[in-house]
Each structure stands twice: as structure tokens, then as C-alpha cells.
Image (spheres, rainbow, N blue to C red):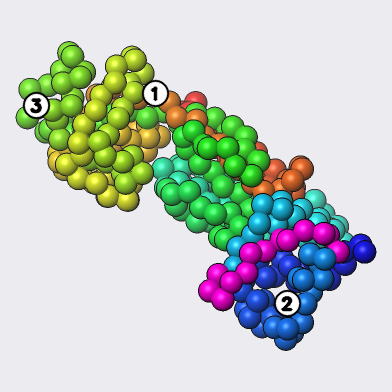
Amino acid sequence: MKPSLEDMQVFLAVVEARSFTLAADRLERTKSAVSQAVTRLESDIGTRLLYRSTRSLSLTEAGSEFYAHCREIKDIYNSALAGLRNSSDKLAGSLSVTAPHALCGPVIVPAIIKLAEQHPHLKIRLLANDSPMDLIESQVDLAIRVGNLELQSAKISKLGLLGESLYASPQLIDNQCGVPTDLTELENWPHISNDWQGSPLKYELQSGVQVRATPKIRCNSLHDIVQLTEAGIGVARLPDIIARKKVKNGILCPITSVAAAPIHYMHLFSKRPPAKVQIFVKAVKAQLQNCTETG
């Protein structure tokens, strides 16, 4: 039997609520009716979509793929409604995005400001997070990530490169008798790191030299890492677009460049993502290029 759109909507609600009870409340239906709709959908499709237990609810592999298709159908439907309500070329609806802190200030936020001016009816939710996120669980449409990503069910495309360097305060460099000619001697300097970098630290410098060090201080806030570096507590690996103004003002000094990290964007849409995702990616690319050129 052909699956009904109504049952698909119920399935979407259950996945996004991660609970039959919460989904029933949101849909103003009984829990039994919601459960029956999902069971009926699984029967019509001929495969299990959800793993159910008394304490948890999770998607099967087929369920994850089907959920992505359902999200796409929902977005197409909402875009069609928005188009009827708004005859202009302005975007409407909502867009949920996650990005690392390093990119939010110089790249993501300026892109959002421009989009907010051009598309006043588009609602954007930004989640600044340096750790990997479950796009389904977090209800995120688009994730922007720095570094090499492990292959997963999401569609992944490259945005550009993030230039990074090791930075220190003039005070720390003086205390260490200047920048060493042999960069491996940096292993003996105090280091500050972000949690995602792990311990021990492993830096691959642009020159090909590898540096390993045990961090003196670790934290999960880029803002705090910058402050600690400014105070002369240690050396830190920082994005060049973040440290640039600090260098111009004489607060920080670049020691050596680290191998550039790739920037990717990822989503769960099975084919071409909705217009709002495409336009957001385009705005981010433009801002990233602007940051690189003005550096």
C-alpha cells in the first residue's frame, strides 16, 4: 500500500520530538494514534524505521534515509506555500545552522546580517558549536565544519580553507629568548589548546615540520584561549582571521603557519538542498572569500 503523507508527517514529528508522547502533544493526537501511524507507515514501506524501547527512540539506517527524504518533501511544501504567500523573490521559513566559534564572528554572522536585510521573512537559528552534532537530533538543516570529516550519511561539500598559525604574546616570546630557529623547540614552550585538539597536541606546520606538545591549559572556548594567549600564558593555534587584528595592534605575534584546514558544509537533503540552504552557503562563501582577500 502507498504510504500516506499524513503518516509521513507523524513520522517526522516523532523523530524531531524524539518521543511518541511529545509528538502526540504537538500534533494534538493520542499517543496510540501516533504509534499506529508510524507502524502503518513501516508496514506500507516494508521496513522498520525506528528502534523503540521504553527509554529511547532511534532511527534505523533506512529510517535515517527516509527521514532525510521526508524533510525534503516538507521543505518543498513549505517553500511552495511561502511562494504563494509572497510573490517576490524573498525567502521565507526557518533555517537552522551550526558552525564552529572560529567562523561565527568573522564569517557566519556577517553573512546572516546580509541575508536578514535581503530576506526579512527568513528566520535563522545559529548554533555555535565546535563539536560534531547529530543533525537529526539537533534539528539542524546545515552544518559548517572545519577539518577532515568522516564519511557519513550527510551530503558533504567543500567551502574553502581556514588559514591557521601558532601565536604568542610578545611577552612570552621575549621570555623564551625569541622564536627558535629549530621549530621543534616549540615543543618545550607552554601551550594552550581547545578541547577538540586533544592531548598531546600534534601540529603539522606549513613547512612540513611536525610539533608535539602537552598543553598547559585546555578549554572549550576560543574567546578564552585568545585571552590566555594575549596574557602570555602560552602558545596557541588560532585562525588567522581571528588573530589578524591582534597582530596589527601588537597584542599577538605569529610564530609559524600551520597547514590550512578544509572547511566543509553538510546537510541531510537527499538531492539538491532548498533555496534557503543554497543562498546561505553562497553568502558564507562570499564572506569567507572577502575575509581571505582583505587579509
Residue at x 37%, y 35% (from the top left corner):
239
**What residue does disc 3 label?**
176
Q: Position of residue 201 (x, y in %)?
A: 27, 34
> Would you place residue 52 above or below residue 45 in this image?
below
Instruction: Based on the picture, tell me whether residue 50 belongs to the magenta stretch.
Output: yes
Q: Are marks 1 and 2 in contact (CB under 8 Å)?
A: no
Residue 261 lies in the magenta stretch: no
Which of the two marks, 2 or 3, is nearer to us in this view? Answer: 2
Residue 3 in the figure: left or right of residue 227: right
Sequence-earlier tag: 1 or 2: 2
Magenta residues span 44-56
Residue 280 visible? The answer is no
Q: Mark 1: which secondary structure?
A: strand
C-alpha separation, residue under disc 2 versus residue under disc 3: 66 Å
Q: Which residue is mark 1?
A: 259
Amino acid type for the residue under numbered disc 3: Gln
Numbered mark located on residue 35 in the image: 2
Which kind of residue does numbered mark 1 sit on? Ala
Of residues 129 and 68, the one drawn nearer to the viewer in this rendering: 68
Q: Whole-percent x and y of residue 120?
A: 67, 59
